Image: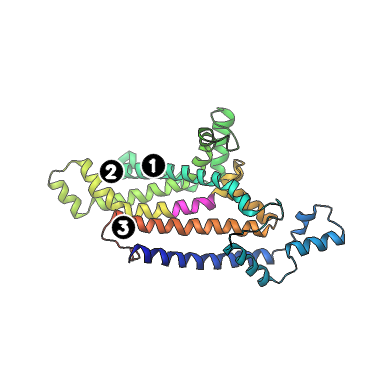
Amino acid sequence: MSLGSYIVRRFGGLLLVLLVTSFLVFGLLYLAPGSPLAYILGPRGGSPAQVAAAIREYHLNDPFFLRYFTWISDVLHGNLGFSIVYRMPVSTLIGSRLGTTVALVAMSAVIIAIVGIVFGTLAALRGGWSDQLISSLAAIGLSTPVFVIGVALISLFAVNLGWFPTFGVGSGGVDTMWHLTLPAIALSVASAAYLVRITKAAVGEEQVREHVQTATVRGLSSGVITRRHVLRNALIPITTVMGLTIATLIAGAVVVENVFALDGIGSLLVKAILQRDFAVVQACVLVLVVAFVVINAIVDVLYTFIDPRISLGSKK
């Protein structure tokens, strides 16, 4: 399959996934109890005239399908709607928070890749007590909830030692990276532990392949064998897990952003769901779904560079 055909097919799949997902989310919000009028008019409510005006302005009495297709039409024209809680365009609201989530996910992905591949390879190659120690730490990381890790990091490194700030995203640049260090570590622990186990299994499986044994008999150094014959062939499952991990980190950032009081997409989504801010919820879901599909498409393209025997669109 050519790259152009692959992109067209992926784009069509993305549109279908977005349509189904947005319909389900919109329907669940529509059926949920409560009314967004409480957030529009305030806790004291308003006069009948104010209530009627708010209903007309936000089309709250329109039938479900009419409201849904109106929203879809606006999205296709580049309009993500207007937040009834923040009283501002949703695109502006998400744009101001997207950078925080992207930076958090990017830092977490780097940590996951380095820790997972390095320590997973080390456990597979060394064995013995190194394998037991790394496997035990990985099991602990997998079994510990994200919010527990976040609270523990804040208590130790922010409150007791004072090395890192407790909340916020800083003023930009290096300061932002410093503020996001603890959140990135908290978000990456479980995924890094899982990648350690996947890497260990993949490297261990490649070590007993015939081509590795042949390279050993030929007298190649252990470093060359590990880099060219073991790690490269083990990269397929490692890349798959990394792609899925990065895609799910965006959703997993919800907990971390709330623990560390970060103004990202995750915390915005939680608040919007509680406040029944339909337009914001829909837009956040669109961002999550687009990121998931695009990242998985990138992973499929990377397969062809890792292993030339794999072609685009083929079954791995």
Label 2 and label 3: CA atoms lie apart by 27 Å
Give percent across and percent down for residue 27.
64, 67
Per the image, label 1 sits on a secondary structure element best described as helix
Which residue is rendered at x = 63% and y = 57% of the image?
Answer: 281
Quadrant position of residue 256: top right
Mark 3: few/some/many CA within 10 Å (<14, 14-19, 20+): some
Between disc 1 and disc 3, the foreground one is 3
Q: Identify which amino acid the numbered label 2 is placed on.
A: Leu
Is residue 145 at least partly visible in the picture?
Answer: no
How many marks do you count on the picture? 3
Q: Identify which amino acid the numbered label 1 is placed on.
A: Ile
Give percent across and percent down for residue 37.
77, 59
Question: Which residue does the numbered mark 2 point to in the structure image?
Answer: 125
Quadrant of the image for the N terminus?
A: bottom left
- Residue placed furthest toward the front: 77
Question: Which residue does the numbered mark 3 point to in the structure image?
Answer: 304
Quadrant position of residue 83: bottom right
Quadrant of the image for the C terminus?
A: bottom left
Q: Identify which amino acid the numbered label 3 is placed on.
A: Thr
Q: Is residue 56 magenta?
A: no
Magenta range: 244-252
Is residue 36 at least partly visible in the picture?
Answer: yes
Which residue is rendered at x = 46% and y = 67% of the image?
Answer: 13
Which residue is rendered at x = 74% and y = 59% of the image?
Answer: 36
**Badge 2 or badge 3: first in the primary sequence:** 2
Mark 1: few/some/many CA within 10 Å (<14, 14-19, 20+): some
Question: Which residue does the numbered mark 1 point to in the structure image?
Answer: 114
